[in-house]
């Protein structure tokens, strides 16, 4: 089995799609995408960012994303005010690390990034300490106060190997922050194969609050907080998934955000989007204290005991 992620043997098939079979481990309940002949990670992520300027969207979208990266830096600084070192695994273009170094007195702000364009951007433009390698192939002799993975763990072949390595890299009482899509979210359940965060081109593992908590405990982390709301992802993911379901099309609006251009179809999608977006925002706010929101955001502490 190519993408065997947990060590158990018995799986049930939840759904079979052309790109992948979605299977669930009968033992640990982890949900995996099993791809027959998927491309290698290097190939998939080389075109994730534009070659020339490492952008993904137009100017205004990029500006909004940058604002959200500043917000991440604020949250990190607030979580561990005395922290001086951080490792961001799958560090995007490095904006959060840049802000932490510039405004929050972080001495070490390191990242890993396998996409060449984003790697060069963060090293050359933002002057950050970034490694153009998979976490598992890096030999470090240093430890970090904080390690973060923002929408990364669902992409990697072996989340368990990652957690094992992170455990070694964290300082005593160090914090691990993970955000991934929530497979138990209300739109995942409602829209199934139209769920935006299914993203079978990139995603390999699907977590629920229960399975991610269990995995962290297995690797000796103590879960300190768990939430399922994200200002950046929740309303957008819900809306795009509902629009997908209604129009029976995959992520037309989301892809338009990256490509641009105008036609009648995008006008119709824009109208649907603007009607559903505020409704979805309200639903996600109402679901704030449930575990049905679009992301899982977990803060866990290294357990030395
Ligand atoms: Zn399992």
Image (cartoon, rainbow, N blue to C red):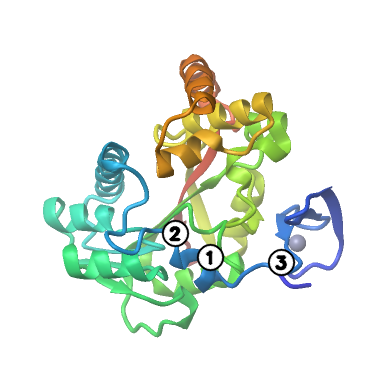
**Label placed on residue 48:** 2
Mark nearer the viewer, 3 or 1: 1
Rendered image quadrant of residue 82? bottom left
Say whether disc 3 or disc 1 marks the residue closer to the N-terminus: 3
Pointers 2 and 1 in contact (CB under 8 A)?
Answer: yes
Which residue position holds label 1? 44
Rendered image quadrant of residue 32? bottom right
Q: Secondary structure at mark 1?
A: helix
**Label placed on residue 6:** 3
As drawn, 187 above or below 133: above
Q: Is mark 3 within 8 Å of ligand 1?
A: yes
Q: Is residue 149 left or right of residue 35?
A: left
Report the residue at 79% width, 72% height from top. Answer: 1
Report the residue at 19% width, 69% height from top. Answer: 124
* Coordinates of residue 53 in the picture (x, y in percent): 27, 59
Pointers 3 and 2 in contact (CB under 8 A)?
Answer: no
Report the residue at 52% width, 40% height from top. Answer: 295
Could you tell me if residue 127 is visible in this image?
no
């Amino acid at each position: 089995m190519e993408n065997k992620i947990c060590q158990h043997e018995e799986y049930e098939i939840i759904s079979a799609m052309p790109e992948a079979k979605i299977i669930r481990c009968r033992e640990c309940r982890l949900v995996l995408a099993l791809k027959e002949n998927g491309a290698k990670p290097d190939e998939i992520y080389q075109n994730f960012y534009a070659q020339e300027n490492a952008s993904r969207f137009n100017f205004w979208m990029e500006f909004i994303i940058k604002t959200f990266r500043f917000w991440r830096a604020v949250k990190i600084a607030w979580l561990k005010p005395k922290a001086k070192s951080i490792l961001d695994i799958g560090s995007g273009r490095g904006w959060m690390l840049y802000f932490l170094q510039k405004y929050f007195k972080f001495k070490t702000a390191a990242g890993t990034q396998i996409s060449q364009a984003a790697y060069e951007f963060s090293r050359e433009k933002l002057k950050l300490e970034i490694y153009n390698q998979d976490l598992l192939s890096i030999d470090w002799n240093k430890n970090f106060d904080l390690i973060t993975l923002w929408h990364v763990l669902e992409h990697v072949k072996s989340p368990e190997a990652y957690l094992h390595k992170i455990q070694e890299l964290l300082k005593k009482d160090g914090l691990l922050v993970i955000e991934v899509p929530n497979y138990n979210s209300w739109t995942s359940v409602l829209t199934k194969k139209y769920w935006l965060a299914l993203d079978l081109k990139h995603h390999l593992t699907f977590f629920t609050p229960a399975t991610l908590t269990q995995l962290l405990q297995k690797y000796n982390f103590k879960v300190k907080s768990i939430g399922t709301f994200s200002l950046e992802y929740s309303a957008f993911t819900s809306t795009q998934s509902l629009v997908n379901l209604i129009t029976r099309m995959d992520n037309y609006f989301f892809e338009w955000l990256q490509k641009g251009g105008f036609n009648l179809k995008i006008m119709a999608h824009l109208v649907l989007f603007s009607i559903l977006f505020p409704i979805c925002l309200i639903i996600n706010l109402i679901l704030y204290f449930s575990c049905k929101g679009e992301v899982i955001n977990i803060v866990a502490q290294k357990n030395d005991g």
